Image (spheres, rainbow, N blue to C red):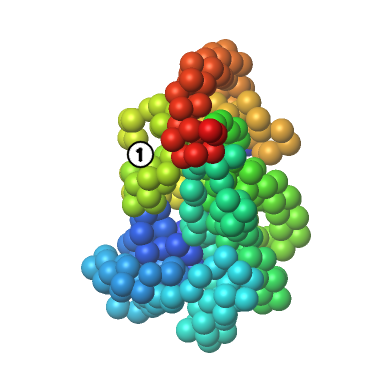
Amino acid sequence: MFFPKNLWNPENLHVYVTGGSTGLGLSIAVIMAKKGAHVSIVARNKVRLDQALQTLEEVRNSPSQKFNTYSYSLTSCEESEKAFRDVCAAHDGRAPDAVFNCAGSAKPKFFIELTKEELEEGLANSYWIETWTAWIAAKEMVRQGIKGKIIFIASTLAYMSFVGWANYAPGRHALRGLTDTLESEFRLYDIGVHTFFPPNMMTASFVEENKTKPYITKKIEGEDISMTSEQAAAILLKGIEKGQAHITGDWITTSFRASTRGATHSNNFIVDSLWNFFAMIAIPVWRRSVDSQIENHKKEHREYLKSIHFLP
């Protein structure tokens, strides 16, 4: 794609945002409201949903806009279906024109200290929580002939991974496999599929992740988290407007996108080729740096395992 065109305007459309009470989901909901869309938000926390609704009212573009919130956990198919039915009911049974899958969470830890429940929850919160909603929404959109959009939120970790992310990265890699499949398959129905691969953002979820995140993981990531959820939402919308299948917003994620693109559509052949050339040099250097830090962390890690009584 050499010359992307503006392909999408959410004005007067019904936009469904999961995980829309905080962070990136809320930032997306706000942008959609400002642009004149009807917005439905689903999240778990009722108090935060009420606060999010007030935020949307403050940026209302038109008195005719509908803003609704619903409290559901979306990690099961049954709850996801109930939530979707309620969202549609408020619009006379019509499915949304766009679905933003922003719900999800991570609990970074060392693989050997994760419990069975945490491993299962990790896949639920990084893969199934988006997949159930997309599956339910897609079926209804096809039945009703809605030529809309389904947007997935992945992560830089859907392109790569390193120490500490065994609870989260596998589900994100699986999600990328799903979204690449659907981007192809849903052309049958004129439903656009886009996947956003954001880096760490300064959000409440990021603060929560850091409570269990291993020291070595924090060290590799660094402390400079320069992207806010508002900036990420603006990058996502710009990518959708350009019709990009994979959307990235920082140099390292863009490098991974270009170097691991496979058969995914190029955003811009010339620019992506330049990024790929850069990645051929930069990524091996980055990888060696990561491996070196992990090797140097062995003694400290052994002491940590003793402190949690994993080792004698």
Depth order, front residue of 267/304: 304
Q: Is residue 120 above or below residue 219?
A: below
Residue 257: % across, % down = 59, 32
Q: Quadrant of residue 113?
A: top right
- For residue 264, say whether it is visible: yes
Q: Is residue 239 above or below residue 69?
A: above
The residue where tag 1 is placed is 227
The picture places residue 33, in percent across and down from the top left corner, at 35, 65
- In front of the other: 142 or 79: 79
> Which residue of the protein is positioned furthest toward the front in this rendering?
312
Q: How many marks?
A: 1
The secondary element bearing badge 1 is classed as loop
Tell me which residue sits at (58%, 33%) in the image.
Answer: 161
Amino acid on which disc 1 is placed: Met
Q: Nearer the viewer, residue 51 or 194?
A: 51
Query: Percent from the top left, x then y, of residue 235?
Result: 43, 43
Binning the other alpha carbons within 10 Å of mark 1 as few (below 14), some (14 to 19) or many (20 upward) gives some
Residue that protrudes farthest toward the left in the picture:
58
Residue at the (57%, 65%) spot, across then down: 75
Residue 53 percent coordinates (x, y) = 31, 72
Q: Residue 3 lies in what quarter of the image?
A: top right
Note whether residue 5 is visible. no
Please name the residue shown 66% across and 74% down the image. 140
Above or below: residue 4 compared with residue 192: above
Image quarter in which the N terminus is found: top right
Residue at 64% across, 71% down:
77
